[in-house]
Image (cartoon, rainbow, N blue to C red):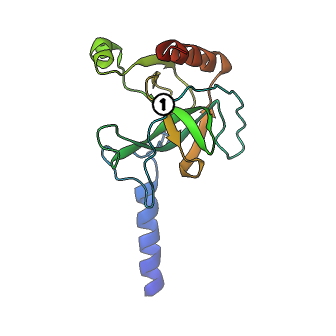
Amino acid sequence: MASSWRDLLRRGLRALTRAPRGRARTAPRTRRAAPPTGHVALPDYKGRVTPAYAPRLDGDADPGEVVWTWVPFEDDPSQGKDRPVLVVGRNETYLLGLMLTSKDHSRSAEKEARHGRHWMDIGSGDWDARHRPSEIRLDRVLQVDPSRVRREGSIMPRRVFDQIMESLAALKGW
């Protein structure tokens, strides 16, 4: 009897976690999520970024790779969202990154800029399961604990990486 309950439970859990046919499973969508257990939100990086492009899909997050990690909200760092981040460099033991989104901010670019948020269109890539056009936020450089990276997504093309770094330097006045 116990094994039939276990089998039933196992089948039910598999059905709940299975992606619909024809669609790839993407990262869970979380609006206002608490940080992972034991996680301390790191402050945004305020220094100059020395860009490095050295992607290697070897299980470790390297500059030039898009990875998934928990990103704290600016208005409440105790809350956040799991999202893609482009690793652009390192700061001692932490990765430095810029967050990506598939949300189109071009319609509200003036409003975003008034609030200090600057976005750049980067096109689509393997970091998004549906290959939607993406934007990257230039004004907020994140510090990411490498042990908190959930998974590697893809490699950002070198040409796009260089354009992002040029735009970041221009915005920051480096």
Q: Is residue 170 left or right of residue 64?
A: left
Quadrant where the image shows the C terminus? top right
Asked whether residue 29 appears in the rendered view, the answer is no
Q: Residue at x 36, y 20 (%)?
A: 104
Q: Residue at x 51, y 12 (%)?
A: 170
Q: Is residue 164 left or right of residue 79?
A: right
For the image, the number of numbered tags is: 1
Asked whether residue 126 appears in the rendered view, the answer is yes
Q: x and y percent of residue 125 in the render?
A: 56, 26
Q: Which residue is label 1 attached to?
A: 46
Please name whichever residue, 5 or 74, is drawn nearer the observer in this view of the structure: 74
Q: Residue at x 52, y 22 (%)?
A: 124
Q: x and y percent of residue 123 in the render?
A: 51, 18
Please name whichever residue, 126 or 39, is drawn nearer the observer in this view of the structure: 39
Q: x and y percent of residue 37 in the render?
A: 43, 61
How would you rate the neighbour count of disc 1 (Cα within 10 Å): few for under 14, some for 14-19, many for 20 or more?
few
Please name whichever residue, 166 or 174, is drawn nearer the observer in this view of the structure: 174
